[in-house]
Image (tube, rainbow, N blue to C red):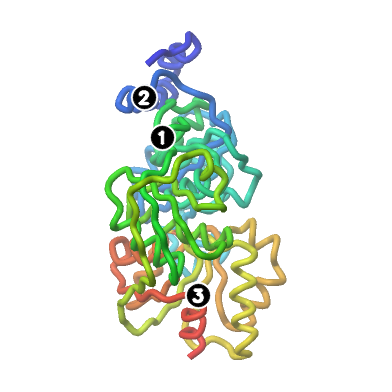
Amino acid sequence: MHLTKDEEALLESNSSVAKLMEILVALGKIYGAERLIPIHSSHISGISYQNIGDEGLEWLESLNAKVVVKTTVNPAGMDLVKWEAMVDKDFYSKQIRIIKALEKIGAEISLTCTPYYLYDVKFGMHLAWAESSAIIYANSIIGARTNRESGISAIASAVIGKTPYYGLHIKENRAPNVLIKAANFDPSALGYHVGRILKHDQIPIFRFEKTLSKDELKSLGAALAATGNVAIFHVENQTPEWKNFEIPKEKIEIDGFEIKNECEPDLIAIGCPHLSKDELLQVLKLLEKEKKTVKRELWLFTSRYVANKNKEIVEKIESFNAKVFCDTCMVVSPITEKFECVMVNSGKALTYLPKLRGVKVKFGSLKECIKTALN
Ligand code: F3S
């Protein structure tokens, strides 16, 4: 890989910067990149103490480096305000140390998997994002360009301000190679199913009978990225790049797909990925329609940014006895382990909750989830 003189000099810098530069060079070599390109922003995942433990915490604290581009971070293991409802003091203090370490390198403590709600991510921008649901959103729905970075390579790119030029940064590699015709589906369930049946490195283009909202595309993408190794999809007449490519010959037809799994939920958890304002409003509308307070635990997860901008909606939702949490989610917080069966409307949560939190999971649409919470 060709390095400029300035880039070569970074390999001789202090040991943190040199190590991070070595990571980018190694990745570039593995994937055949000819050079590094500048990035607009970075998004760091894997920052919950639950997931990275003492080893990850100590590594972050050992970093002697500063980010040089806008850098946001994924959810932590607890709500920073309502943490006592979720974790013990020891967990809290370790999580705060992780946050302080990230602050020290210059990252914004956004604590959300939806960084695209926080600032204007534009078509064609090169990014180095970790967090599969954010990556697939940025590539597919916005038309920005990022590979599936890990937490560590996202930190490396944030500090160096560059990423190796390969994979989805190159237009030709973003072409679809399988057409999926789908009807009568829940977007999250469809993503969950399609991710499982796609072959490695297949990029789908969907043909739907109706237009999906951005939130529905967000759910579809998050599920697709959770069950498959997918970082981009296209939708005919909807996503920004679909017209740039030919429609592939290989075709899969799906008519009505349901996820069947039964357990009696003691928690209904909504907000994977973190809820948008419109999604909060949808929940509120469903609650207001029934005019009843919830009978089971109903927890909603969103970013502090969205919650602060929509305080009235959040208060109204909480008046129905539902709880709105920020900075964290049902998958990265240890609190979910206290429950036996968690009902979700997210194909991503459905995939990870049994694996990471060891709980049973039931899938339903948002309407079904709210109905269950009320009865
Ligand atoms: Fe976000 Fe947590 Fe789901 S980080 S995408 S809400 S698993």
Tag 3: residue type?
Answer: Leu
Q: Which of marks 1 and 2 is in front?
A: 1
**Label 2 crowding class (10 Å Cα cut-off): few <14, some 14-19, many 20+?**
many
Residue at image location 64% in from the left, 56% down from the top: 305
Q: Distance between the residues labelled 3 and 2?
A: 42 Å
> What residue would you read off at disc 2?
28
Give me the disc on residue 366.
3
Q: Is residue 251 left or right of residue 217?
A: left
Total marks in image: 3
Where residue 324 appears, x then y in whole percent? 57, 70
- In front here: 70 or 104? 70
User: Where is ligand 1, by quadrant?
Assistant: bottom left
Residue at image location 63% in from the left, 66% down from the top: 278
**In the depicted structure, whether residue 120 falls above or below residue 365:** above
What SS does tag 2 mark?
helix
Q: How far apart are marks 1 and 2 (CA)?
A: 16 Å
**Label 1 crowding class (10 Å Cα cut-off): few <14, some 14-19, many 20+?**
few
Residue at image location 60% in from the left, 61% down from the top: 276
Where residue 270 appears, x then y in whole percent? 49, 70
Residue 348 visible to the viewer: no
**In the depicted structure, whether residue 283 falls above or below residue 27:** below
- In front here: 195 or 303? 195
Q: Which of marks 3 and 1 is nearer the N terminus?
A: 1
Q: Earlier in the sequence, mark 3 or mark 2?
A: 2
Give me the disc on residue 337.
none
Tag 1: residue type?
Answer: Asn
Q: Quick one: which residue is furthest to the front in this view?
A: 249
Residue 243 visible to the viewer: yes
Looking at the rendering, which quadrant does residue 3 occupy?
A: top left
> What residue would you read off at disc 1?
173
The answer to whether the beta carbon of the residue marked 3 is less than 8 Å from any atom of ligand 1 is no
